[in-house]
Amino acid sequence: MSQRKKTAILISGRGSNMGALIAAALKPDYPAEIALVVSNVPDAPGLARAAEFGIATAVVDHKAYPGDREGFERALDETLKGHGIELVALAGFMRLLTPFLVNAWSNRMINIHPALLPSFKGLATHERALEEGVKLHGATVHFVSAEMDDGPMIIQGAVPVLDDDTPQTLGKRVLEVEHQIYPKALALVASGSYRLKGQQVVRTSGTGEREAAAPLINPAD
Ligand code: GAR
């Protein structure tokens, strides 16, 4: 197999998606190696979790750059370059990025968002999904572009919304699907087995799984 892509995960909190990516990358044939975990929050619980796996960690605290988003991003960029990073996966990284970092990592930075984009960009996605009464909700992994929660979508996972759902129960169901789709998306990007057709990410190998695809209908009966 060709060289595994050196990947950094950027977090701000507990890092459960980070955990899913680390677990996937433990397999020797996984095309990405998690080489670094960076947090903008010094006491993010995910940092300790990453260290338990023997993964290098770093903190770039945005509070050290008051009113200077680009200064923060330059420091982040230097940290990434200093570790020879080739791909970046945002996993609950709660900072809006400026064109500086987005352009520096164009087509090499991906993000997971807890909604079926382009619906429910931004925060409180589960609350808003319930308010709007959608029957299917989910998560999206996408390339990061200059617009928030925008950019070519790599994979989406849908879950049913149940009548008695709260934002918490729905969020838990979505998080489970996040943990399934993020490792698949990173593998696709790291292996380079895709091409961009406008905004569409088209797979160039491994399409066999599609035979198992079934419509998700809710309510089903
Ligand atoms: C995840 O649900 C992720 O999709 C969301 O934050 C959570 C982080 O959880 N990201 C965003 O809302 C980004 N706009 P985790 O730290 O356990 O992975």
Image: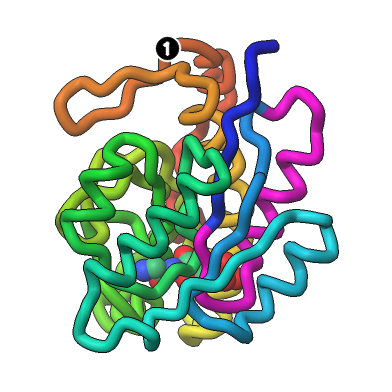
> Quadrant of residue 191 in the image?
top right
Q: Is residue 28 magenta?
A: yes
Q: Is residue 131 above or below residue 190?
A: below
Residue 148 point in image, percent of width and height: 21, 62
Foreground: 122 or 88?
88
> Quadrant of residue 38 in the image?
bottom right
Foreground: 62 or 133?
62
Instruction: Give the extent of the magenta segment.
Output: 10-30
Judge whether residue 173 can be spotted in this image.
Answer: no
Residue positioned 70% across, 11% down in the render: 1
Q: Is residue 215 above or below residue 163?
A: above
User: Could you tell whether 170 is left or right of 48 in the image?
Assistant: left
Residue positioned 46% across, 52% down in the render: 158
Residue positioned 27% across, 70% down in the render: 71
Q: At label 1, which amino acid type do we have?
A: Thr
Q: Is residue 50 magenta?
A: no
* Residue labelled with disc 1: 204
Could you tell me which secondary element the residue under label 1 belongs to?
Answer: loop
Residue 19 point in image, percent of width and height: 70, 59
Foreground: 177 or 34?
34
Instruction: Indicate the colouring scheme.
Output: rainbow
Bin the neighbour count of mark 1 within 10 Å (Cα to Cα): few under 14, some 14-19, many 20 and up: few
User: Could you tell whether 112 is left or right of 184 in the image?
Assistant: left
